[in-house]
Image (cartoon, rainbow, N blue to C red):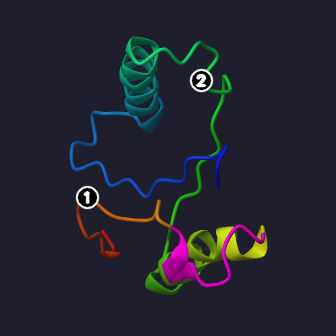
């Protein structure tokens, strides 16, 4: 989606709060965008998070995210959306 960023994040260190991670990530990306001439604002002030509690939930959410460009009629097939990818493969692992 051109105006959204959807992430699946797993924090190994429980001392790191998701909100702190998001703040740092937004600041880092904003600095890079400004260096490339993209004026702020780059982000909304808040973010929405959803805790995944099961493998089924993970699969459902991943499918939902992958289908977003199709639902928005930006592409006809999920494979056609060039902005989908992963840095590391994540799998649901209950505590």
Left or right, 69 with reference to 79: right
Dot 1 falls on a residue whose secondary structure is loop
Q: Residue at x 37, y 20 (%)?
A: 32
Q: In the image, what residue occupies the spot 67% across and 69% down?
A: 68
| Residue 76 belongs to the span the image colors magenta | yes
**Front in this rendered view, residue 40 or 58:** 40
Whether residue 57 is visible, yes or no, is no
Q: In the displayed structure, would residue 94 be above or below residue 25?
A: below
Residue 41 drawn above or below residue 72 = above
For the record, the magenta segment spans: 73-81
Classify the position of the C terminus by image quarter: bottom left
- Report x, y in % for residue 78: 56, 80
Q: Which mark is residue 42?
A: 2
Q: Residue at the location (64% across, 77% down)?
A: 67
Residue 86: x %, y % from top left:
32, 63
Q: Which residue is mark 1?
A: 87
Quarter of the image where one finds residue 93 = bottom left
Q: Position of residue 43 (x, y in %)?
A: 61, 26
- Distance from the alpha carbon under mark 2 to that under mark 1: 22 Å
Q: Residue at x 21, y 42 (%)?
A: 13
Tell me residue 70's x, y (percent): 70, 76
Task: Tell me which label, 2 or 1, sits earlier in the chain.
Answer: 2
């Amino acid at each position: 989606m051109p105006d959204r960023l959807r992430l699946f994040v797993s924090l190994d260190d429980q001392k790191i709060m998701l909100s702190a991670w998001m703040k740092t990530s937004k600041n880092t990306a904003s600095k890079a965008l400004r260096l490339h001439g993209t004026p702020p604002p780059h982000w909304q002030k808040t973010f929405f998070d959803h805790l995944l509690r099961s493998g089924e939930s993970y699969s459902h959410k991943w499918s939902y995210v992958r289908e977003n460009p199709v639902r928005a009629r930006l592409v006809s097939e999920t494979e056609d959306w060039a902005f989908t990818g992963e840095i590391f493969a994540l799998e649901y692992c209950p505590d």
